[in-house]
Image (cartoon, coloured by chain):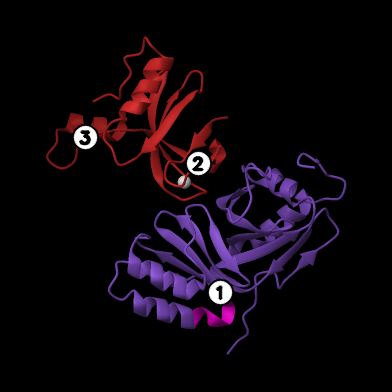
Amino acid sequence: MLTIHCPCCGVTAEETEFHAHGEAHLKRFGPGSSEDEFEGYLFMRKNPKGVHFERWRHQYGCGKWFHVARCTMTLEVFGSYSAQTTEPPQEIMDIIHDRRPDTAAGPAR
Amino acid sequence: MSDPVSALKNIFDDTGLVRVSEIGPIGMVTLRGDLSDKVLGKAAVAAGGVNLPEQGQCNTEGSQGIAWMSSDELLIMCPYADVHARLADLQEKLAGSHALAVNVSDARAVFDITGDHLREVIAKLAPVDMHPDQFNGTMFRRTRFAQVPAAFWMPDGRSARIVCFRSVAQYMFDLLKDAAMPGSEVRHYA
Ligand SMILES: [Zn+2]
């Protein structure tokens, strides 16, 4: 059971009040892109054992989208942050580096 | 004109740990827009009859009030008979604003639960820390009650008011009654 904090309304609750929506920080490939790029954008997702960046939605609460950094192996949640960004903020990366010193973690480009 | 009828015709049950009653109908207007906008704020205050609530809070006064639903949404409550007039006034004041106001009164069901064990009845159903140090005052919480979305607040220390969709009113009533079944006291907050 994960305990998730919503940065949009300030509520902290267990995960059933929220819904996970998969890998965060995807780069969109639309019209004009190659078939390989488009396929990658639509279907190819990382499935790491360890640090992962995800999109979440406060499904039963304020209804807003945000991002969560967590560990898929230990279920430790490092923190949540605004969806209005293309990469994790420094304070989240600092927490991850502190907790997982040997992880060069960052989202895939 | 036909008479407004609430979903469960004001059914109640007082055989359990708390008294569960369906109340209403209650006038409700969903207002979406930029909550920091002065025009919108003034129009909302006029419609709800109370001050604007802070994030995660509600201000209520008798049958009227305003609840903070999200960073761009307020719930305005009023007597059912007043909702058309208040909505018309609101829409007139917001004519030049990028905002949306809709009468949702008939899409909702409202329940009151009253009694010493109401905190644990809610705690059985919603992922909310109901300890008096954690949930108190004018706090307003959107969450789930078992499998359905709901929002609630505590007008006073001994009662809570729960808002859900009208289509799940029977489910909500049964749920609350079950959670308040005699003999099922947990006394976690006693
Ligand atoms: Zn939220």
Circles 2 and 1, Cβ within 8 Å, touching? The answer is no
Q: Which residue is mark 2?
A: A18
The amino acid type, in three-letter code, at marker 3 is Phe
Q: Colour of chain A?
A: red
Q: Which of the two labelled residues, at mark 2 and mark 3, occupies the earlier sequence position? A: 2
The answer to whether marks 2 and 3 sit on the same chain is yes
Q: In the picture shown, does residue B44 fall above or below A74?
A: below
Q: Which mark is residue A38?
A: 3
Q: Image quadrant of residue A32? A: top left
**Dot 2 lies on which element?**
loop
Q: Residue at x 49, y 66 (%)?
A: B51
Q: Position of residue B79 (x, y in %)?
A: 59, 77
The answer to which image quadrant residue A42 occupies is top left
For the image shown, how many numbered marks are present on the structure?
A: 3
CB within 8 Å, label 2 to label 3: no
Determine the CA span between mark 2 and mark 1: 30 Å
Chain B tint as drawn: purple
Q: Is residue B44 shown above or below B138?
A: below
Front-most of residues A30 and B59 = B59
